[in-house]
């Protein structure tokens, strides 16, 4: 591999990934902790290394609206946001997926107010799981860059034409510096050809887009949208393979298993906390404890069959959610439990933690595995357990 | 701001206007002023237009799948996002190297003065090459005649009912033309479907602007106004003639009054022909006339050289 090495933050990796993907139009509004993406792109536009129409929009709502407008004439587009900004875009997220505009967006996962917090958790993107966007969650800066490039290839595939959200843990990934490999532009161009879509307004073939439907037609459009998302699963795998062959980095498709073959207790994680959990698995394996880990990469499309296969020999599954669906349980747990319902005899428990930027330590993860492995404890504990709380819960 | 009058396009009149139609087969109400504004504007802008319409009457009547009423590129935007989507269309076309294209917005008064104002302000601030046309029928008509920021004092709507306690709408019509001009926009104008030639020539001017332009066209709505369907054009003309609407331009950082009637036609005649004003008493009428006179005094003082 002759790829240049650079020392960058997660935000900067995304900015570099966006540049390599050559979007025609970038529209973004600053919000912590996404801001550095916008700043770096602005600098690259200024110094001439990033040839794009950069739009200083006055809000996130206009950011998503503008990239849809550009996408509607056949342009490749990029935007980035976080938290409150994502929530402000919510109308546009549904609009973009319904309009089949393959917009690519980076989201810096951050808590939603109130109370205000600029720090990380997944409540922003998870609350929009049903908005029809492909959602990938990355573990480090390298994966952030690589997925920004892969995102276009998947989103723009003629059988997919679905917007794509690359999620990075706020601060933990967006602001942490790592050494990463920078793919060569030539190879990225080879991997990612120019954007072509029949779904566009053009001088050659004028079209009316974004129309309204009667009850006689609406469901067929929604069915097609669902089908495209389901079909994207194969495209995601194919793209990961092609990317790996060209750049030497594979991401194990939709989920990554770590020491799960003979594991009794398997913890399911999303995003950057996976790195910590991997270390804990190694430590506990040294102590002879049969623990394993699954890093869920895609939450939409949800890797149902792949997850079923990965967990079928486990005795107990733990799901670590950096979110809570108030009045029920962690959203990732709900999704995982729906898969477990098709398998018999697997216990499960939901750990809720890391909200508003609270650390999840090795000790916390060790506790999770221990309580999963110890049935006495598990029977006593609630299905949903808030970990590392500063106040006593009601038991 | 650059001079926009450098290129003098040919004046449009009844003889040289194109026979081509770009907006037809739609389901607008009889006598719809908004649809006439769209039809006439697109005759001027032509086939290189990329129309963006937010939620509102024209998007509701023009895009009912599979019957598409635009014979040129067109797309419905989010309600607050017409201007930002048109900005994106302009940026996309520019990046793709498409020359001589026109991103054009057709938005109602609510979509412009209320929910769409932020995005419109952003477009003007960036000076994106967008022709923004607001067809003003003075209420949210598509949802069933609710008050907007451009509904004038005394108007009866379904959210400002007139009764023993209230005279309908209590607020004055937002002064949007001057709000837009205050951005330092390259070209802005007011128009009326009652003066179609003036309207089309303002569109023609807007088409030549290398940046954002804004046309605010008064468009009657028989359904919402309780006016005669066959008199829509006449009604919109009367609004200008009685001084409750005006024809003006803002260009090269200066305002210009295009029509300065020596004598106004009676406001009472204009109001009494419309169901939405039928309930008004003499006091309300006096207030409306006093406000009209105050506005004209200011316009005549500041906008005439």
Image: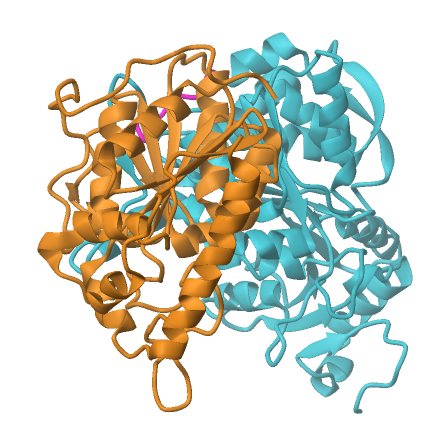
Q: Residue B121's image quarter? A: top right
Residue A367, compared with residue A362, is above or below; it is below
Quadrant in which the N terminus of chain A appears? top right
**Prevalent SS, magenta region:** loop
Q: Which range of residues does the magenta coloring cover? A: A193-199
Tell me residue A141's x, y (percent).
76, 34
Chain ID for orange: B
Quadrant in which the C terminus of chain A appears? bottom right
> How many numbered dots are placed on residues in this image?
0
Tell me: B90 left or right of A286: left
- Viewer-closest of A391 and B93: B93
Q: Residue B224's image quarter? A: bottom left
Residue B137, compared with residue A38, is above or below; it is below
Q: Residue A194: say if magenta.
A: yes
Residue A181, compared with residue A11, is above or below; it is above
Examine the rendering and report whether any part of residue A298 can be seen.
no
Examine the rendering and report whether any part of residue B298 can be seen.
yes
Q: Residue at x 78, y 70 (%)?
A: A115
Q: Colour of chain A?
A: cyan
């Amino acid at each position: 591999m002759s790829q240049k090495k650079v020392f960058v933050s997660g935000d900067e990796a995304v900015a570099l990934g966006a540049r390599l993907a050559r979007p025609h139009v970038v529209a973004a509004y600053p919000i912590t902790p996404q801001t550095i993406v916008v700043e770096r792109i602005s600098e690259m536009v200024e110094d001439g290394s990033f040839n794009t129409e950069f739009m200083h929009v006055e809000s996130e709502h206009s950011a998503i609206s503008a990239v849809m407008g550009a996408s509607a004439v056949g342009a490749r587009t990029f935007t980035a946001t976080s938290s409150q900004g994502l929530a402000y875009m919510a109308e546009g997220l549904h609009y973009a997926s319904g309009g089949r505009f393959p917009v690519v967006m980076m989201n810096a996962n951050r808590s939603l107010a109130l109370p205000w917090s600029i720090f990380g958790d997944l409540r922003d993107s998870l609350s929009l799981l049903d908005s029809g966007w492909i959602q990938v969650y990355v573990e480090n800066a390298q994966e952030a860059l690589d997925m920004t490039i892969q995102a276009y290839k998947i989103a723009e595939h003629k059988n997919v034409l679905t917007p794509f959200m690359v999620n990075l843990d706020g601060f933990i990934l967006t602001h942490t510096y790592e050494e990463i490999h920078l793919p060569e532009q030539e190879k990225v161009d080879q991997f990612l050809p120019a954007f072509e879509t029949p779904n566009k307004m053009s001088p050659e073939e004028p079209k009316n887009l974004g129309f309204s439907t009667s009850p006689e037609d609406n469901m067929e459009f929604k069915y097609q949208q669902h089908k495209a998302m389901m079909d994207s699963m194969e495209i995601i795998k194919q793209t990961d393979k092609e990317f790996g062959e060209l750049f030497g980095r594979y991401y194990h498709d939709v989920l990554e298993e770590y020491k799960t073959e003979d594991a009794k207790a398997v913890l399911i994680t999303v995003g950057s906390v996976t790195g910590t959990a991997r270390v804990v698995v190694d430590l506990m394996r040294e102590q002879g404890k049969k623990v394993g880990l699954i890093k869920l990469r895609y939450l939409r499309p949800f890797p149902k069959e792949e997850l079923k296969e990965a967990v079928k020999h486990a005795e107990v599954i733990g799901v670590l959610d950096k979110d809570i669906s108030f009045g029920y349980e962690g959203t990732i747990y709900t999704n995982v439990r729906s898969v477990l319902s098709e398998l018999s005899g697997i216990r499960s428990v939901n750990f809720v933690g890391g909200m508003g930027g609270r650390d999840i330590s090795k000790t916390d993860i060790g506790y999770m595995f221990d309580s999963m492995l110890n049935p006495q404890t598990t029977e006593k504990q609630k299905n949903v357990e808030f970990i590392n709380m500063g106040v006593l819960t009601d038991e | 701001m650059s001079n926009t009058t450098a290129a003098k396009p040919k004046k449009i009149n009844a003889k040289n206007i194109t026979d081509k139609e770009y907006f037809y087969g739609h389901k607008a109400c009889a006598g719809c002023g908004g649809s006439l504004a769209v039809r006439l504007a697109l005759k001027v802008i032509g086939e290189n237009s990329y129309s963006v319409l937010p939620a509102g009457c024209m998007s509701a009547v023009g895009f009912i799948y599979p019957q598409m009423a635009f014979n040129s590129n067109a797309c419905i935007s989010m309600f607050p996002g017409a201007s930002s989507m048109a900005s994106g269309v302009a940026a996309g076309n520019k990046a793709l190297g498409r020359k001589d294209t026109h991103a054009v917005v057709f938005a109602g008064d609510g979509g412009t003065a209320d929910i769409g104002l932020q995005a419109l302000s952003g477009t003007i601030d960036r000076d994106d090459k967008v022709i923004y046309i607001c067809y003003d029928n003075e209420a949210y008509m598509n949802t069933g005649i609710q008050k907007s920021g451009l509904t004038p004092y005394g108007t009866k709507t379904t959210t400002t009912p007139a009764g023993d306690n209230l005279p309908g709408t209590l607020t004055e019509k937002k002064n949007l033309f001057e709000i837009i001009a205050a951005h330092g926009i390259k070209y802005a104008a007011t128009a009326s479907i009652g003066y179609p030639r003036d309207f089309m020539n303002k569109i023609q001017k807007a088409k030549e602007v290398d940046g954002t332009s804004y046309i605010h066209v008064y468009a009657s709505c028989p359904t919402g106004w309780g006016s005669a369907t066959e008199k829509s054009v006449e009604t919109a003309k009367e609004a200008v003639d009685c001084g409750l609407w005006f024809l003006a331009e803002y260009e090269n950082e200066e305002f210009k009054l295009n029509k300065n009637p020596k004598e106004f036609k009676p406001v009472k005649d204009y109001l009494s022909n419309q169901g939405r004003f039928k309930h008004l008493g003499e006091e309300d009428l006096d207030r409306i006339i006093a406000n009209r006179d105050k506005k004209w005094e200011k316009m005549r003082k500041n906008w005439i050289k």
